[in-house]
Amino acid sequence: MSLMSSFKMPCGTKNNYPEKLDYLTRKGKVVIFQSPSSKVKTAYIVSPKHKGVEFIVEGSPLNIDALYESIDLEEHEIRDASGVFFYKLAETREDFDHAFEKFVKAAE
């Protein structure tokens, strides 16, 4: 089982993600993943930072899923005894900004 990092969402729900994502962030990579709330019908796209996390987008679980799938970054997974954790990875902040900007333009 991989080590986990925990965070608190704006709605008060606590959630976890694999600590490996913190390592990737410290190496200068940009990581995003989906995180649904168990308290309210809201989900988030989350990005780990050097301290804490950034909530990039908030919305309904269906909208967040569609947004996440449409962001043109390579998806990776971590498999362990807890199951499978999916995340998308950009090698640099510029790569992330470019992928996210393409999505925003397409949505307009």
Image (cartoon, rainbow, N blue to C red):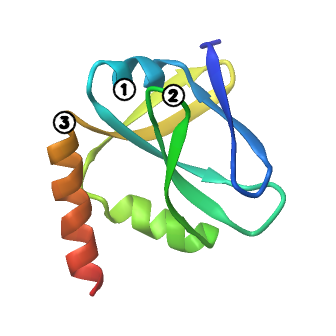
From the image, tell me which residue sits under label 2: 51
Rate crowding at label 1 as few (under 14), some (14 to 19) or many (20 or more) other CA atoms within 10 Å.
some
Mark 2 and mark 1 lie on one chain; the one further toward the N terminus is 1
Residue drawn 56% across and 24% down? 18
Q: Residue furthest bottom?
A: 108
From this view, report whether residue 32 is shown above or below residue 44: above
From the image, tell me which residue sits under label 3: 92
Q: Are marks 3 and 1 in contact (CB under 8 Å)?
A: no
Residue drawn 69% across and 24% down? 82
Q: Quadrant of the C terminus?
A: bottom left
Q: Residue furthest front?
A: 51
Q: CA distance from mark 3 to mark 1?
A: 10 Å
Residue type of the residue flagged with mark 2: Lys
Residue type of the residue flagged with mark 3: Thr
Mark 3 and mark 1 lie on one chain; the one further toward the N terminus is 1
From the image, tell me which residue sits under label 1: 25
Residue drawn 38% across and 60% down? 69
Rate crowding at label 2 as few (under 14), some (14 to 19) or many (20 or more) other CA atoms within 10 Å.
few
Q: How many marks?
A: 3
* Label disc, if present, on residue 89 of the rendered structure: none
